[in-house]
Structure formats: C-alpha cells, structure tokens
Amino acid sequence: MAARWSLRSALLAVAALTLLPVLGVAAWQADREQRGTQASRDASLVAAGDLVVARYGELLEASRRMLSAACTADAVRQSASVQPEPADVSRCEAYFTRVLGSVPGQYSVMLVTDDQGVARCASQPTAVGMTLADRDIFQKVRAEREFAVGEQIASRLGPNTVIPVALPVMGEGAFRGMCSVGITLKALADFSAGPPTKGAIGTVVVARDGATVGGDPIAMRRLPMPTRLAASIVGGQVRFADFGQDGQPYEFHLRAIPDSMLFAVTSMPLADGIVSLGSPWMMFALSAMAVVLALLVAWLGADRWCVQPLRYIQAFAEKVARGEAIKFEPPHRWSPEMASVGAGVSAMAEAIASREAELRAGLEQRDHMLREIHHRVKNNLQMISSLLNLQAGEIRSPRIRRYFGDAQNRVLTLSILHRHLYERSSWSLVDFQQFISDLVRQISVGRRGAERQSPRYHIRAPIMAVGPDTAIPVGLIVTEAVGIALGHDFTGIATPEVRIEAVERNGQVELVIEDNGVGKEGSMHGPDGRGGFGMSLIRGLAMQLGGEAMVSTTEGGGSRVAVTFPAPAADEPEDA
C-alpha cells in the first residue's frame, strides 16, 4: 500500500495546485508580452532600414531631377557633340561648377559626353577628353535611353568612391550623349543614415566587406567587428545579436540598399543586467518567486500551527498510554481550533487516568479477596488434614490408618495448591516445578518416622505456569503415585530413590513417576496395575487432563506411572 501524504504535504499540494493557474497565466502573459516586444523591436529595426532605403531613393530622385535640369540646358546640349564650340564648353563648365557648388561635398565630377562616350564638358577640366565608353553606366544609358544608376567605382578624378548616375542626351530621337554625375559614397551614407542617434535605434551604412561607409559616430561604435558583419552579409543573415565595439549587447538588422553594394545596418540595445528587470520574463520570475515564497510560508505555517501541535498531542497520548503522570502544557500558544482539540485530548486523558485508577483499585481489591479466599481455603484444608491426622491416631488398624493417610495426602495436595495460588503474584497460575517439589517434600515429611528406609527424590520438571485445572489433577496423580512408591520396600537398595520427571515435547507433556523399590506381591492389583481406588483415580485424572495413564512395574519390582497429556496453553484463562 502506498504511503499516505502527511497533512503538511497535502496542504502544500493544495496550495500549489491553487497557485498553478496563476503561474500559467503569468507565463502566458510574459510570453505574449515578449513576443509583442520582439515583434515591435523587429518592426522598428525594419522600419529604420526602410527609412535608409527611402532616403537613398530620395537622393537618387534628387540627383535625377538635378540631371534633368542640367541636361536640358543649351550649353550642356551644345557640348554633347564631337566638336563642340569652345564658348559652349566654357558656358557648360561654368554651369556644372555652379550646380555642384549648391550642394558641396555631395557630388563628385559632373560631365557630359558625346555619343561615343568621350567627355566633352566637365566640372573638372581634367576630365575633358576622357573616354567613358567602357563604363557600365554609359552602356546602360545608351541601351535603355533613360535614367540609370551605375556600380560604385573609385573615381579617376578624385579620392572618393562614387556611385554614378546618368541621363541620356537626346536629339531628334537619336542618342547624342550622356549627362552624368557621381554621388560620393560618404555623402550617400550620411544622407541615408539620417540624423545622429538619439533614441534606441542607430543606423549605419556599410560596404559588403563590413567596412563602415558613413553614419552617426554613436551608431558606428555599436557595430561589431567588420569580419562579423561581412560574414553575416555573405551568409545572408538578416538579423543577429552580438556585442558591439563598445562592449554592450545589441540586436542588428541588415538591409541591402538597391542598385548599390551598400547595406543599411540598424541596431538596438539588448536588455542586460538591471535593464532586464523590466522584461516580461523577469516579471514572471518575480511571480514564481512570490509563489515559492507563499508555498514556503504555507509549509512553515502548517508546521507551526498544525504539525507541531499534532506531534505534541501524539507524544502526550503516548506518554498517557504508558501510564506516565504528565500535565498537558503546550510549549506555545495554539490556534483556537488546535487548543480545542488539545483540551479534548487532555480531558480524555484525565478521564482515562481516573478510570484506570478505579479499575486498578478494583483489581487490587479483587486480587486481595481472591488471595484471602485461597488462604482461608488452605487453612481449612490444613485443619481437615490435622483432624484426619488426629483421627488416624485413634485407629489401631494399619490398613485403615493407611487409608486415612492417603486421604490426608490428597487434602494436603489441595492445601499446597491453594498456598501456591495466594503466594504467587498471579493468583490463577502456579509454578509447575515448584508445586511438585513442595508437594513431594510435604508427603515425605508426613512419612518420616516409618520403619522403612526413606528414598531420595529426584525431581525434574519444566518451569512453566499452569492453572488449577492442570495443577490439581497433576498434584493428585503425583500424590497417588508417590504414595504407591512409598509403600514399597527399599531395604537392601543401595540408593533408594523416587524419580519424578516431566518432559514437554511437540505440544505434549509426559509425566513419569517411578521408584526402584520392591513392591509386595499383589500390591499393584495385577501385573498391569489395574484395580484399586488409587489406580482408578490416576486414570480418571489423566482422562480429565485430556491424556492417558500407563501404570507398569519396573524390572526391580518398583512401580512406574507414566501420564501423557496436552501441554497447557500459555495464557490459560484466569477462571480455570
């Protein structure tokens, strides 16, 4: 059978089951808030990346409008020929210089070519005569006849890396040349990244190799090592978390800028340390700690107000059961319910003690009365024995005197039995061995003074307590058998003896009384010992014990009485 739960464990289990739904709701709410927070963070990072792309689009659109205005100027259109007039070239150069001066640092060289890709007019005179026919931007514009954006290149005319943009110069439906300008990469990055980082999100533009192109210096310090950025770009990793160069953890989002080899990197700090205390799962952890604390308080409270009082009541009841005189004094103040239970147990203990005192007094009185009864019965039997002895003194016939002696021994047996009953602590049981020893001693004392030689007695009996129902028949059997033995002649016997032995084996008791004397002819009333009052009495008493008696003659002429009967129960009833 499985062990039952204690009261404290059961209370704790009930409290845990009660608080479990609260923890479940807290976990669900924390997960929901975390998902919402993560979705909001992702949306913010994506929006910041989209803003960079939008700014890049704005810059391209501004560059397109600027080229559209420039390419339609007469001086520019006149310069887009194989042999332009020097005056037209001068006006064109002045125009390009004036246009670029309005947006300093944002653009590189502005130029116009003929239909073969040779620069005929440029904001920087050294560019005139340079061929651009091998550039992809020229090929795109000539093929598509519309606004085009080229790949970023290292400028031949300056230290900056640029992204060229261009428009075709058309005349009478034919391609006449290309009007182009180079957007500096740094200007593109600064314009696309937007204003300096003031909030949680920072934006930086980087190249494919992870090198920083432009952006806010604060956001640049957030970036991880360039190799880490390059690996994410090559691996197509759009979102990742890592530590920035300032040692703080950040979440990064990569967004490719169209028509370029640039990437917008948006960053947002991750919760760390004390910041994480406000996270949804931290609130769940606090809720879980509160639940654990509540369960601990419930455990200690159950121990303080339930378990400890019940243990004291149990210990008090055990001491009362052992009969100790103890006063019900709890070590500390209990709750009203436990105090009521304790008062009930204390009242019950007092009632039990009072009842036990009454029963003990009644038992002592009953024991005293029974002992007194046994004592008086013993005295009366001794008086009868004495009267028989006095009466025997008046009888002259030896045969009748012997009959009186046998009767006196039987009465003496009952008297000894009652003496043992009132002398022992248990008035219903006698010591089997001690009873037989006293009985034989009294019988032998009564036979002293006879002319025959007195035998020695060898008594061997198990030490066991028996009731009167067993002791009386056994005592009378021993009395009759010893009486028969003492009637034998021990003259000429070197060591006259009477042996009395009782052996218990396999739930049976075998009582043997035999002597080595010489009986008179016919004293046993036949070879098998049948006949006579003594023999009949022995057999009748053996039947009363539930056994049988075997009477025989030994080789020397003595007698042997063997009685076998069931061993008495260890807890023989008191009224036996």
Image: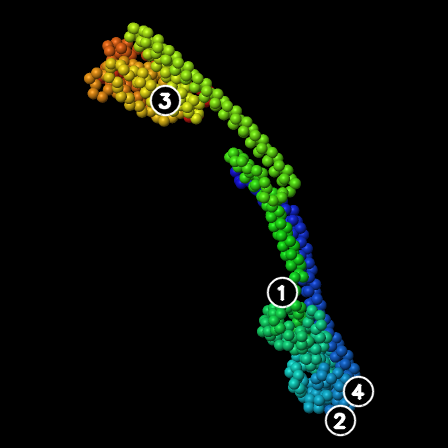
Percent x, y of residue 350 = 58, 33
Q: Earlier in the sequence, mark 4 or mark 1?
A: 4
Percent x, y of residue 238 = 64, 67
Does the rendering let one see residue 293?
A: yes
Q: Report which residue position mark 3 lands on.
A: 435
Answer yes or no: do the residues labelled 4 and 1 have beta carbons within 8 Å? Answer: no
The amino acid type found where label 4 is placed reads: Asp
The residue carrying pointer 3 sits among few (fewer than 14), some (14 to 19) or many (20 or more) residues within 10 Å by Cα, namely many
Answer yes or no: do the residues labelled 3 and 1 have beta carbons within 8 Å? Answer: no
Q: Secondary structure at mark 4?
A: helix
Q: Secondary structure at mark 3?
A: helix
Q: Report which residue position mark 2 lands on.
A: 86
Please state, as top left, top right, bottom left or bottom right, where the C terminus lies in the image.
Answer: top left
Answer yes or no: do the residues labelled 1 and 2 have beta carbons within 8 Å? Answer: no
Residue drawn at x 64%, y 64% is 274
Q: Earlier in the sequence, mark 2 or mark 3?
A: 2
Q: Earlier in the sequence, mark 3 or mark 1?
A: 1
Q: Report which residue position mark 1 lands on.
A: 273
Q: CA distance from mark 3 to mark 1?
A: 94 Å
Answer yes or no: do the residues labelled 4 and 3 have beta carbons within 8 Å? Answer: no
Q: CA distance from mark 4 to mark 3?
A: 156 Å
Q: Is residue 572 above or below residue 347?
A: above
The residue carrying pointer 4 sits among few (fewer than 14), some (14 to 19) or many (20 or more) residues within 10 Å by Cα, namely few
Percent x, y of residue 284 = 65, 56
Answer yes or no: do the residues labelled 2 and 3 have beta carbons within 8 Å? Answer: no
Residue drawn at x 45%, y 21% is 371
Q: CA distance from mark 2 to mark 3?
A: 161 Å
Q: CA distance from mark 1 to mark 2?
A: 71 Å
Q: CA distance from mark 2 to mark 4?
A: 14 Å
The amino acid type found where label 2 is placed reads: Pro
Q: Report which residue position mark 4 lands on.
A: 74
